[in-house]
Amino acid sequence: MKIILCGFGVVGQSLVKLFESRKDELYAKYGLKPRLIAVFDSKGSAVDQSGLKFNELVEIKKKYGTVKNYSKENNSMTGIEILKNIDADVLIETTASNYKDAEPGMTHITTAMKKGMHVISVNKGPLALAFPSLMELATYNQVMFKFSGTVGGGTPILDYAKNSLSGEKITSFAGILNGTTNYILSNMATGLSFEEALKDAKNKGYVEADESLDLDGLDAAAKLVILANWVMGMKVTMPDIKCTGIRKVTIEDIKKAEKNNSVLKLIASCDNELVVGPKEIPKEDPLGVNGTLNAIAFTSEHSGTQTIIGKGAGGTETASSILRDLLDIRQEIAKK
Ligand SMILES: NC(=O)c1ccc[n+]([C@@H]2O[C@H](COP(=O)([O-])OP(=O)(O)OC[C@H]3O[C@@H](n4cnc5c(N)ncnc54)[C@H](OP(=O)(O)O)[C@@H]3O)[C@@H](O)[C@H]2O)c1
């Protein structure tokens, strides 16, 4: 399977390491032989139709900060030139999520779809801003569009809601979809101020380079958009979410929740409306998880409420979700 990879940061590199470490098993068990024919980061590209060497790519990126130095030839093509001129089966999009105009991911995804490539995205920006039209574009071009890693990292939240509960009607859901803010609120519950808890989260590398994505609830809102479209069949985008972050949460708010035998969490919910905001959750509720964990409770017509809990992010976890998507695509192609 010929693959183009956009972005070679934490997730991109974790994916390539996974390709290397599971190479034999992927072929023996699933008949999947991922051939990475092009990779690009913000500074340049590496292209080899016969397949780039996984370990070498990671070493070069570590040494030079870009994949551009992989080879002296074939390193001057821009990402767009690669997508327009090189034929591949699948594009894997792992550039940074941007909720202003969704670029550069949006152009990568639409260009690839128009060329007839299947697309896997862990980048939430394009989905948050244009989920309905991207699904239409995929259908129009008869390509598969997969995005398991956008919600819950390696925890298969989207697959659970869509496939394990198929035949059921999910009537509402609510959950903690951002691990960073959960870590901060969990630490505030132990007595830390917002500033102290934020500093600790930053020191641990949990906070996005643009902290607003976590603190103002944008990351959680983007995931809520994806869930609402995919699970509930809504046609919504970011402006449809009522979003409040955690910057104004005080120790007094945390203490008030404690008095009510509750915990304060940043909850993303889909009921009569789509809301992200701090909310008191009863202590005994399974949603009240601590640290960087994510949790989501789906309520359906006949199966009651079920809660899934797991790590919501992490390079390897997210890379493993890409692998799941790739295997799904491989299976679908094999059926044809
Ligand atoms: N990390 C996680 O746990 C996780 C979990 C779920 C989803 N995600 C999503 O997955 C995506 C990647 O996350 P990450 O942690 O791997 O981020 P990252 O480490 O910041 O990597 C982003 C990559 O995108 C590249 N890039 C930026 N602008 C580009 C451009 N114009 N053209 C080509 N490449 C460009 C960067 O290039 P340089 O290397 O040159 O800077 C970098 O390689 C994000 O959208 C994130 O929201 C991440």
Image: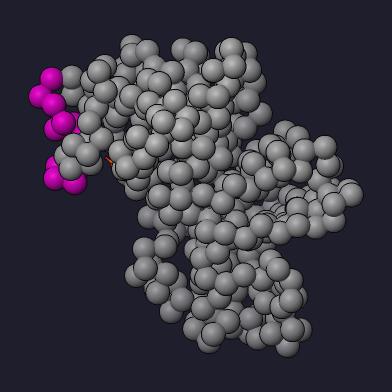
Q: Quadrant of residue 277?
A: bottom right
Q: Nearer the viewer, residue 284 or 194?
A: 284
- Seen at 42% across and 61% down, the residue is 207
> Is-magenta flag for residue 64?
yes
Reply above or below: 113 against 300. Answer: above
190 sits left or right of 301 in the view: left
The answer to whether 155 is drawn above or below residue 126 in the figure is below
Would you say 66 lies left or right of 185 here?
Answer: left
Query: How many numbered callouts?
Result: 0
**Does residue 1 appear in this view?**
yes
Question: Image point 49% across, 83% down: which residue?
Answer: 192
**Residue 100 pos. (x, y %):** 50, 40
Q: Is residue 107 magenta?
A: no
Which part of the image, by quadrant, shows the N terminus? Answer: top left
Q: Would you say 21 lies left or right of 45 here? A: right
Locate residue 307, reporting x and y percent: 71, 59
Q: Residue at x 56, y 51 (%)?
A: 155
Image quarter of residue 230: top right
Q: Check the image and report above or below for 10 versus 147.
A: below
Residue 168: % across, % down: 83, 42
Left or right of 68, for residue 3: right
Where is residue 147, by image quadrant?
top right
Residue placed most toward the observer, 27 or 135: 27
- Give, as a single range, the part of the protein colored magenta: 62-73
Residue drawn at the location 55% of the way across and 24% of the way down: 331
Ligand 1 quadrant assignment: top left
